[in-house]
């Protein structure tokens, strides 16, 4: 629908509802909606008739809504009638869309009459508390953490970033310390208290703190001491991470600087003036590796503390390394990348690494690239053949083979079966099949199921569960820059193989390994569908048949 036509439909719809155009824009209106049996005046702003930006509905007169506590209204965009995940609106029915918006705004206000305001305000309490800019917590908050500090760091974008971290961390940045930080834990959600929705003075903060069920009311003297010593105090609860600091009077600061006021006297001084000393309020966001990586999994990442060795930092290994760190690898456990090759021009078309790393060892380049993901991430880069380092490899919990090289796959499989070690319990292979016809991953737990070589026990024979038609001729192309020949396939095949392996890794780490062999078609003209399965061992497998007392 043409925008002008849509505006005409909206205008006619609103005028029929008693709204009038008031400007300053063409789509700014005032009118009334019905809430709890009464008319409530609102102002409506429609910034976009395609509804990519949702219309804003603002109360004109707060006194028209009788409940003392209202939820979803004190925000920059007025009444919060839709969740942040968005509201589906039909741009081809603009009149009905606007009526829907008004109906949702009315329903939102109605919840405060039904007694739901307190519950809703508690759920979104951090939004009401917000005053100053956000503070990112790089330190985990599973328990009260000491020796925290607020620092300013500069991101690659040039934007300043304010972070809370443990002293001595942030090895990849140059933090400028601003002030100390202390944290008080609340076992229950925080919210408004009798007479204090959000505190603005030290006296109100004391009243608010002492009425919170989950906070230790007797701990207020400690909070006061920290605030008086110019620390930033945060309160960590299931529904909010919020903080406060004092706007210290200039005469007190001057006295401390001159030495005429001792630090031990500061709590007493600010207590005497608590009714007039203002506070600044801050909101915190959890940005530690555990929180970031577990957010999309729905629980703490099962691989946080695992020691993982990734063999191969090429077209599959680069993306898989990124998936692993985004899933928790390298957070508390070790993540080591093996690759003895350098990045060449011919790699760029399907590699995670960009042009700036040309000529650099792939393992070292991946370490440098991935450690930009988070300040606390630690990766080990080993620029040599992994099979020559088996004594160290067997000390990891999991080895991930992303080489896609048949000879390396076979050798790693044999080493795993014959000399695993006390901690190594799994090996995960992933590869692109044929010329990108499909991708596969295989998890070997050295149990009653197949090993990797069982998938193709005779080299002269075919794969037992191929992801493509092996009768197709394998297309190899001479490469430039001294690379030798290579097998062309597009980057989506590499990413698919990495994705299969990462999901298998997470399933195994969570105690539910599921199907050991997983396949996906990436080229529907040449790929062959294979259902997920856990193959039985082959009696003709040269790697494991003798261990099972089988063979030809």
Image (tube, helix red, strand yellow):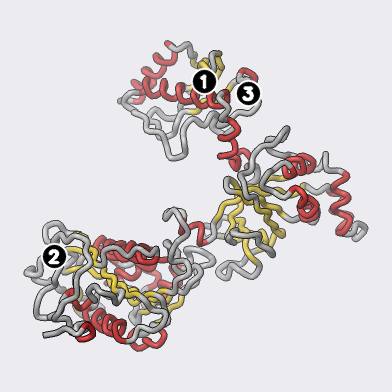
Measure the C-alpha gap from mark 2 to mark 1.
63 Å
At horizontal 85% and vertical 52% (from top left) the residue drawn is 267
Q: Quadrant of residue 43?
A: top right
Rounded to the nearest angstrom, the CA distance separating label 3 from label 2 is: 66 Å
The residue labelled by disc 1 is: 23
Q: Is residue 32 above or below residue 161?
A: above
Crowd tier of the residue under label 1, counting other residues whose Cα lies within 10 Å: few below 14, some 14–19, many 20 or above: few
Q: CA distance from mark 1 to mark 3?
A: 30 Å
Mark number, residue 67: 3
Q: Nearer the viewer, mark 2 or mark 1?
A: 2
x and y, in percent, of residue 142 in the image:
59, 59
Relative to 541, residue 77 above or below = above
User: Does label 2 or label 1 sit earlier along the sequence?
Assistant: 1
Pick the quarter of the image with the C terminus: bottom left
| Closer to us: 512 or 129 | 512
Nearer the camera: disc 1 or disc 3: 3
Specify the label residue 468 is tagged with. Answer: 2
Q: Position of residue 91 (x, y in %)?
A: 34, 28
Residue 230: which quarter of the image? bottom right
Mark 2 Cα shell of 10 Å, populated few (<14), some (14-19), many (≥20): many
The disc, 3 or 2, on the residue closer to the chain's N-terminal end is 3
Q: Residue at x 28, y 75 (%)?
A: 447
């Amino acid at each position: 629908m043409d925008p002008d036509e849509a505006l005409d439909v909206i205008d006619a719809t609103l005028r029929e509802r008693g709204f009038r155009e008031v400007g300053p824009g063409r789509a700014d209106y005032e009118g009334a909606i019905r809430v709890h049996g009464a008319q409530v005046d609102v102002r409506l702003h429609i910034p976009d008739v395609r509804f990519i930006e949702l219309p804003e509905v603002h109360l004109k007169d707060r006194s028209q809504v009788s409940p003392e506590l209202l939820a979803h209204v004190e925000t920059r965009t007025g009444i919060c009638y839709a969740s942040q995940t968005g509201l589906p609106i039909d741009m081809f029915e603009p009149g009905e869309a606007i009526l829907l918006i008004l109906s949702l705004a009315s329903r939102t206000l109605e919840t405060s009459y039904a007694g739901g305001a307190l519950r809703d305000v508690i759920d979104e309490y951090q939004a009401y508390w917000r005053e100053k800019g956000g503070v990112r917590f790089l330190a985990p908050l599973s328990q009260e953490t000491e020796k925290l500090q607020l620092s300013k760091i500069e991101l690659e974008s040039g934007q300043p970033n304010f972070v809370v971290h443990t002293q001595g961390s942030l090895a990849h940045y140059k933090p400028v310390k601003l002030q100390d930080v202390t944290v008080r834990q609340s076992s229950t959600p925080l919210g408004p208290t009798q007479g204090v929705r959000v505190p603005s003075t030290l006296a109100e903060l004391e009243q608010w703190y002492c009425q919170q069920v989950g906070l230790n009311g007797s701990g207020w003297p400690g909070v006061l001491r920290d605030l008086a010593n110019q620390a930033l105090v945060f309160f960590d609860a299931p529904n909010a991470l919020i903080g406060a600091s004092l706007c210290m009077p200039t005469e007190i600061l001057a006295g401390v600087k001159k030495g005429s006021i001792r630090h031990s006297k500061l709590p007493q001084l600010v207590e005497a003036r608590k009714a007039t000393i203002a506070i600044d309020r801050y909101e915190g966001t959890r940005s530690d590796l555990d929180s970031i990586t577990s957010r999309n999994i729905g629980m703490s990442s099962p691989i946080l503390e695992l020691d993982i060795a990734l063999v191969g930092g090429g077209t599959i290994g680069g993306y898989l390394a990124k998936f692993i760190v985004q899933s928790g690898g390298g957070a508390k456990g070790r993540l080591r990348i093996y690759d003895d090759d350098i990045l060449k021009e011919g790699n760029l078309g399907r590699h995670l690494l960009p042009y700036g790393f040309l000529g650099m060892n792939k393992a070292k380049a991946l370490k440098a690239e991935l450690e930009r993901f988070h300040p606390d991430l630690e990766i080990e880069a080993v620029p040599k053949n992994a099979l020559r380092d088996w004594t160290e490899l067997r000390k990891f919990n999991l080895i991930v083979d992303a080489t896609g090289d048949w000879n390396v796959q076979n050798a790693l499989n044999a080493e795993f079966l014959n000399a695993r070690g006390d901690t190594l319990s799994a090996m995960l292979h992933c590869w692109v099949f044929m010329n990108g016809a499909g991708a596969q991953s295989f998890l070997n737990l050295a149990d009653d199921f197949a090993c990797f070589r069982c998938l193709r026990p005779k080299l002269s024979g075919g794969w037992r569960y191929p992801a493509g038609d092996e009768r197709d001729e394998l297309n190899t192309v001479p490469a430039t820059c001294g690379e030798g020949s290579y097998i062309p396939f597009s980057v989506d095949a590499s990413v698919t193989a990495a994705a299969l392996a990462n999901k298998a890794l997470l399933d195994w780490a969570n105690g539910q390994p599921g199907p050991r062999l997983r396949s996906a078609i990436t080229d529907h003209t040449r790929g062959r569908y294979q259902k997920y399965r856990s193959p039985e061992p082959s009696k003709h497998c040269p790697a494991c048949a003798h261990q099972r007392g089988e063979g030809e």
